[in-house]
Image (tube, rainbow, N blue to C red):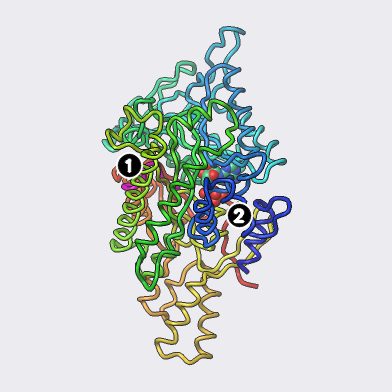
Amino acid sequence: MTDSVVDSILKARYLREGEKDYDDICRRVAEALGENEDEIRDYYSEMLSLRFLPNSPTLMNAGTELGQLSACFTLYVGDSISEIFDAVSWGAQIHKTGGGTGYNFSNIRPEGSPVCSTDGVASGPVSFMKVFNAATEVIKQGGRRRGANMGILNVWHPDILNFIESKKNEGDIANFNISVMVNDEFMELVEAGEFDKVWIHHPNTGEDITVGAVWEGIINGIWRNGEPGVLFYDEINRKNMTPNLGSIDTTNPCGEQPLLHFESCVLGSLNLSKFIYKDVLDRKALERSTRIAVRFLDSVIEKNVFPIPQIRIATRRTRKIGLGLMGVHDALLMLKLAYDSPEGRDFCEETMAFVNEISADESHRLAAEKGAFPAFKGSVWGDYEVRNAAMTTIAPTGTISLLAGCSSGIEPVFSYAYTRKDTVQKTFEMIHPLFESELEKTLSGIGKSPSEVKDLKRKAINHVHETGTIQDLLWLPESFRRIFKTALDIDWRSHVLMQAAFQRNVHASISKTINMPESATKKDIADVLLLSWHEKIKGLTIYRTGSRQSVVLELSKRE
Ligand code: ADP
């Protein structure tokens, strides 16, 4: 079954003319990036073994004329018509190549402001977002994947309430994720309960917008359909690796890359489940693959064909790369560590610290060979020369984790059996292989006969497919149920704490959804945001079950 998913993805996205399978893709990519035979061999075997995969644009475009290899871009949006439409055009060029774009619209003057040159009245950031959205809609027809955008507004922009409401109805501005960039000052007022305090005075409507109105707007939006996301401006900038180049106010579409304007970043992910041998993490193998991956990603910066000169200049100045992990929950299952346990989090934190440290060390070696990144002086690295201003990120790995057949990014498994719709709306039924094999072992282990094992296995799979959980199957041993929890079994606090455990050892940010049950209250959502801020998370997305009609993963009865 999984093979047909992989085939369908390969055909829809990655295979170029004359290529027939994944092996061909690995060869093309390795040959395009490797500088010598050894590198080509290493890159090829890392990808082929599914230990490491670069982001989709690299798999799609390396060794082709297009040659655009990065997933993440952030653009500058100014306040003039020409600056705004420049950004629309840049975005279109990026989408054509499979990249996603982030914009902070806060420079755009608020709705109702005078337009001096025409004596007219400005229509505000939200109206322009709709233009970007329409452009994306048109471009997606020609590309291999539809464009993705992040639209950001600072919490101190006068149009903030309008922005928060801009995705009120499902399907509005559908090619955008939206996020509010909050700052510490705002969060401190919220925490102190200063809801009646005037936060911002709208210069055109005359409205006094209170802290409470903004906070409630955010919470209501999240409760209603998971938008807006929230980004923490001060935390992002406390961890800015190149404060010498200015502050950061924008991220890419899924939020894992806070970047300076015009920077781009290439992502790559190590599949942690491939480094668990005989119930332990093989650190030596992980170190080796990490070092190869850092070289691989750095080489992408050299070979990349950048869509516009500003992006080439900004990207080459800092040379940020985004190496991360996927298959994390699978690795935890193999180690029999519960995702929502302190032991599980400790393992993740230590492992990510290790990857982070090795990545910096490899980048240090690269700097000795090829030079440090040009904006090195004044960066947080001090005297320790590195070739890349930042090395680590946790990507969503939406497609590459499917190719690798592992759990995505650091997310817990959504369900051990589910129906998957692919980009061309074919549906596939997926059963998690570890779940199936461990279930069988566990049932045999408690003395069930082979035919009982077969029946009970079917029963459990049907149940998890239908309901997304096995926690209520009390005939399964507690030791099994404790490990095989799903995204919805895991309480929101554990979701947040896992994200925080990773964030402590990741240079950029993390793509993660905090799943909440349908019954979650607005107070619960407020608590998630406050805890995330305290835990020094840089940004997050919350999703309350059932709050959207259209979802990628869904549970359904097996036929
Ligand atoms: P993949 O698994 O395909 O390599 P990810 O799901 O890890 O990609 O997403 C990484 C980043 O790629 C996103 O944060 C976003 O910037 C970009 N991206 C994701 N999906 C799309 C898309 N449909 N179109 C354009 N860019 C995308």
Q: Position of residue 138 (x, y in %)?
A: 70, 36
Question: Which region shows up in magenta?
Answer: 504-511
Disc 1 marks a residue whose amino acid type is Trp
Disc 2 marks a residue whose amino acid type is Arg
Is 505 one of the magenta-colored residues? yes
Is 251 one of the magenta-colored residues? no
- Quarter holding the N terminus? bottom right
What element does badge 2 sit on?
A: helix
Between 137 and 352, the residue placed more toward the observer is: 352
Residue 72 appears in the figure: yes
What element does badge 1 sit on?
A: helix
Q: Which residue is mark 2?
A: 27
Q: Position of residue 151 (x, y in %)?
A: 52, 34
Q: Which residue corresponds to the image point at 53% horizontal and 90% vertical from the top-left?
A: 451
Query: What secondary structure do most residues of the magenta stretch adopt?
Result: loop
The 10 Å Cα crowd at callout 2, few under 14, some 14 to 19, many 20 or more, is: some
Between 89 and 7, the residue placed more toward the observer is: 7
Quadrant of the image occupied by residue 155: top left
Residue 547 appears in the figure: no
Q: Position of residue 398 (x, y in %)?
A: 54, 53
Q: Position of residue 501 (x, y in %)?
A: 32, 52
Q: Earlier in the sequence, mark 2 or mark 1?
A: 2
Q: Which residue is mark 1?
A: 533
